[in-house]
Image (cartoon, rainbow, N blue to C red):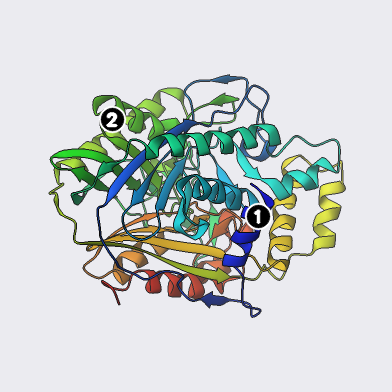
Amino acid sequence: MSSESRRRFLQQLAAAPAAWTLLPSLNAAAESVGSLHLAPFRFDVTPPHGHSLCGGWIKPVVGVDDSLEAIGFVLLGAGKPIVLCAVDWTGLLNDAHVQWRSALADAAGTTPDRVAVQCVHQHNAPFACLDAEAIILQQGDLPHIVQLDFFRRCLDQARVAVESGLKKARPVTAIAAGQAEVQKVASNRRVSRNTYGHVVKMRGSSCRDEQLIAMSEGIIDPQLKTVAFYDGDTKIAACHYYATHPMSYYGDGRVSSDFVGLARKRHQKEQPECQHMYFTGCAGNISAGKYNDGSQPVRQILADRIYDGIVAAEKTLQPRPVEFAGWRTAEMLPVARSTFSADVLQEQISNSKNSVVNRNRPSYMLSWLRRLEKQTPIVLSALQVDDISLLHLPAESFIEYQLRAQQLGGDRFVATAAYGDGGPWYIPIAEEYPNGGYEVSVAFCDPGIDAVMTSGMQQLLLPGDA
């Protein structure tokens, strides 16, 4: 990203000085629709041999089972261009997320505040934080967070893909939304509790503990939601949303888009004229653990179940003419956990006796503190098309935020994508902080993030052109 692009971005995201500030929307809710067009783009983001996966604390790339992609579209005709993009990476954090949004914005001829980049969150994939990479490079004995030359190549490919896609823009005359229940995939990770409600054991992405497996699914959103765009009778783009950690197994160095990516790719082959995109919802406390023992055959079983959900949701689609479209944003400026200390984190990073995960992870924490010192806010956004809202949230948000968004939307059809700016890591709801557990232990913000993010969602989901 050029220095001028970065300067414009930071000017647009200039934060108010008070902590826990919710800043005003940058854009009107509804804009008059002229001639809506959709320009699809996609490009490969598979890391090279030897590249770190999931932040460097699992085995690096030794091979590729199936490629990783960044898939998106530019929506033209509702004010300045709007860009949505789903990336098959574990996460994009802090300035890495800023640079992705800025590169896509420059290529599309828009501003970064009108770009949403959401990661799918597979784990045999890059977990990119440029600030953390700079911190660990100073140590000299830690694996990369992300290789900078590879990161820059991805941005170059993004610009080329968007510019090429703009030449293939097609009219958008209709939109449709539908949903279907996915069977035996999602389950809540935080179901094992003591009499005080404190989390005792976590049911992870995979699980072989018979007691945990026997427990209920817990709080989930069983619905896979699909929003599709049409040129006449032809479906030209479809966004699919489902909330679960998308890992069957990982840590073997074999790059894969995992079961959700395999489901998406299968459907893409069946409908090559349509751009299929998959977004992971608020899955911070959701995984396939109840139905996944981590064995290799289960990956395809889970992929088939996601695929079945996509097909079933598409059967409910009923296209109707588009009347208006618009874009909303809300910015939040959070505060870090009171337990965070830059000096202590630096000591953990510098202690060669610590494991890699206990050195690299603190580098993400220190990056978060430095980001807050610069007062660069987190941006929430929503694309509204008639009575449909595509909501974009940050990091590993808990499922309760997604369910809450659907309540706030009232009669609107709300499809939620999380894993945008991953800077805060996990975002539990306020009442779960006292209950502990893994997710709370690696949440970078204090419980006040619940109220401010909920307020932001409410602002984004106001009806019509309110």
Residue appearing at x 62%, y 53% in the figure: 5
Residue appearing at x 44%, y 51% in the figure: 283
In primary-sequence order, the first of circles 2 and 1 is 1
Residue appearing at x 56%, y 57% in the figure: 426
Q: CA distance from mark 2 to mark 1?
A: 40 Å
Q: Position of residue 337 (x, y in %)?
A: 67, 68
Q: Residue furthest bottom?
A: 18
Closer to the camera in the image, 445 or 109: 109
Closer to the camera in the image, 364 or 439: 364
Q: Quadrant of the C terminus?
A: bottom left
Q: Does residue 316 lie above or below 196 as drawn? A: above
Quadrant of res 412: bottom left
Residue type of the residue flagged with mark 1: Glu
Whether residues under marks 2 and 1 lie with C-beta atoms below 8 angstroms apart, the answer is: no
Circle 2 sits on which residue?
267
Residue type of the residue flagged with mark 2: His
Q: Position of residue 182 (x, y in %)?
A: 27, 43
Closer to the camera in the image, 418 or 289: 418
| Label at residue 64 | none
Q: Position of residue 159 (x, y in %)?
A: 52, 39
- Give the number of marks: 2
Circle 1 sits on which residue?
4
Question: Can the viewer see residue 66?
Answer: yes
